[in-house]
Image: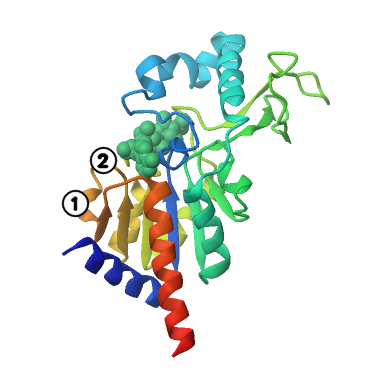
Amino acid sequence: MSEDQDMGALIGRLQRAKNVIALTGSGISAESGIPTFRGKEGLWKTYRAQDLATPQAFARDPELVWEWYDWRRGLMSPKLPNAGHQVLAAWEEAIPQFALITQNIDGLHRRAGSRNVLELHGNIWRLRCTQEGTVVENHESPLSPLPPLCADCGALLRPHVVWFGESLDPDIIGQAFSLSARCDLMFVVGTSAVVHPAASLPLAALEAGAAVVEINPEPTPLTQHAAFSFRGKAGDILPRIDRALREISRVRERD
Ligand code: OAD
């Protein structure tokens, strides 16, 4: 199938779909200047996850872990949402029954205007009290003091993110699975699709009969199951799909 035919077929599916989901990973923020995890210059090429992103690492050396998160906050703080984030924010308005699920902790979907975002792995701009479990929003960069302390009880705060070896919030992952099991179309954007349980969501959608649309410059384990596979950058492909969708809607309205 040529890319034009592919686009035509996808727009048809998109218009007929009753429930549409977008599942995003770090690749959607790459064009905003935020590093991914497993690419050539990915974070896990330079840093060892077990030293920095596990409960054991935090128990051993909270200061070191916080220095790394504070450095990442500093890196992310000036970065802006890109055209990919913006299209998904617009789809929340334009497509009935649209849900956005992200593995990203950078908060860029919300900054782009998405309001209903299921953040599977938490959010780097939220801090959680290690004693009381309370969560506060904090955009200060750099953080002071480091490590930060709870204003109410003085205990250590931790990043409100999911570390390796920890479970995802059961409410959030539960909602993500139930949405996936009843969608007809799932866009999977900028993820290597190897980290579970997030990587199981497209499989749940496929099992329920949905079509998967993959947007990624590289192939992934999911590619073979995707009904549509766009090999390119999210910031190029999503606006192209959006333009095609708007064009068809305009023609329909006119006729
Ligand atoms: P990865 O770094 O594993 O994968 C990023 C994907 O984005 C790759 O498949 C790239 O080919 C693709 N990509 C790069 N640039 C892109 C662009 N401009 N447009 C579209 N795609 C692009 O990142 P994730 O899949 O998000 O977990 O990683 C999943 C989880 O592993 C993360 O949430 C994090 C990490 O360890 C935790 O920290 C719990």
Q: Position of residue 214 (x, y in %)?
A: 31, 52
Q: Is residue 206 visible?
A: yes
Q: Is residue 47 left or right of residue 161?
A: left
Q: Position of residue 200 (x, y in %)?
A: 34, 48
Q: Is residue 119 left or right of residue 113?
A: left
Mark 2 Cβ and ligand 1 under 8 Å apart: yes
- Count every numbered label the image shows and give the total: 2
- SS at circle 1: helix
| Whether label 1 touches label 2, CB < 8 Å | no
- SS at circle 2: loop
Q: Nearer the viewer, residue 91 or 58?
A: 91
Q: Nearer the viewer, residue 64 or 115?
A: 115
Q: Nearer the viewer, residue 4 or 105?
A: 4
Q: Of all residues shown, which one is farthest toward the bottom?
A: 255
Q: Is residue 180 left or right of residue 60?
A: left
Residue type, label 2 = Glu
Q: Position of residue 39 (x, y in %)?
A: 33, 28
The residue shown at (59%, 40%) is 107
Residue that badge 1 annotates: 224
Residue that badge 2 annotates: 218
Picture quarter with the N terminus: bottom left
Residue type, label 1 = Gln
Q: Residues within 10 Å of mark 1 (few under 14, many from 20)?
A: few
Picture quarter with the C terminus: bottom left
The residue shown at (59%, 54%) is 114
Q: Is residue 209 visible?
A: no
Q: Specify the quadrant of the image occupied by residue 187.
A: bottom left
- What is the basis of the colouring in this image? rainbow
Real-space Cα separation, disc 1 to disc 2, in angstroms: 12 Å
Q: Position of residue 50 (x, y in %)?
A: 42, 17
